[in-house]
Image (cartoon, rainbow, N blue to C red):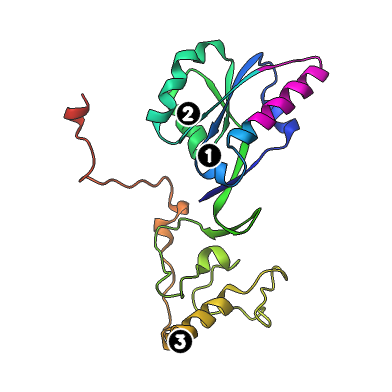
Amino acid sequence: MIVAEQKPLDEIKSMLKGCKKVLAVGCGTCVTVCFAGGKQEVGILSASLRMSTDLDGEAISIDETIVQRQCEEEYNAPLEADLEQYDAILSLGCGVGVQSLAQQFPGKRILPALNTKFMGYPSEQGVWEERCQGCGNCVLHLTGGICPVSRCPKSLFNGPCGGSQSGICEVDQETECAWHLICENQIRLGLFEEMMKIQPAKDWSSARDGGHRKIVREDVRIPDVEKA
């Protein structure tokens, strides 16, 4: 899931400077699950902004709504009918949701209320840990289901660095060494011999460093002639 957290209230207030009426829009998927942008968070943030801006003598009128997925235009479409009355939309969606709204409603200011962090795993109640960076070339079949790109600070591909001690990462003493976990898993699966094979340098051309990425599935794509 995409994990995000709310920006500081003062930062959000600074973005809204000069606005008189705002629509706060939550998202019903990932950011709801990580308690950053669901219905409850939209309500709490809106109430905080109303109170704080009123105390500052710059009261803002804030309406609230939530869509199922901000990253898909069909779910955002109902917002269009009332947009003229708002100075801006305050999006409590991930970065993709913010950009989707901005592309769909180019004449309206779209402001981000959240900082999008990573694709993560809920390791316990209230705790999310990064598990995937979307590098575009998955190697989990070689590493016991543990990602060395996201879980090793050095993104090593051929075993742990010299700083790993007793299964603990040298970068963070509270973090388990990813390669220690990988080795344990491969032993458990009877695949430790696979660890002896030297892996070539990773091809990073599929990762985000290569620029804007997209996937095209012609089998589900609607031809332009049909769109027209």
**Can residue 113 be spotted in the picture?**
no
Query: Which quadrant would the C terminus be assigned to in this image?
Result: top left
Amino acid under disc 1: Gly
Among the 4 quarters of the image, the one containing residue 13: top right
Residue 165 appears at what percent x and percent y? 68, 81
Q: Give the mark nearer the N terminus: 1 vs 3.
A: 1
Please state which amino acid type lies under the numbered disc 2.
Leu
Name the residue rendered at 47%, 82% in the picture.
Answer: 186
Q: Please tell me which residue is depicted at 65% across the width and 79% down the height of the picture.
A: 167
Mark yes or no: residue 183 visible: yes
Q: Which residue is mark 3?
A: 192
The Cα atoms of the two marked residues, 1 and 3, are separated by 40 Å
Q: Is residue 125 above or below residue 197?
A: above
**Magenta residues, as a range?**
43-61
Mark closer to the chain start, 1 or 2: 1
The kind of secondary structure element at disc 3 is helix
- Label 2: how many Cα within 10 Å (few below 14, some 14–19, many 20+): many
Residue 68: % across, % down = 46, 34
Q: Which residue is mark 1?
A: 95
The residue tagged 2 is 101
| Residue at 66 percent of width and 73 percent of height | 169
Q: How many marks?
A: 3
First reached walking from the N terminus: tag 2 or tag 3? 2
Q: Is residue 45 magenta?
A: yes
Relative horizontal placement of residue 96, taking residue 91 as reference (left or right) = left
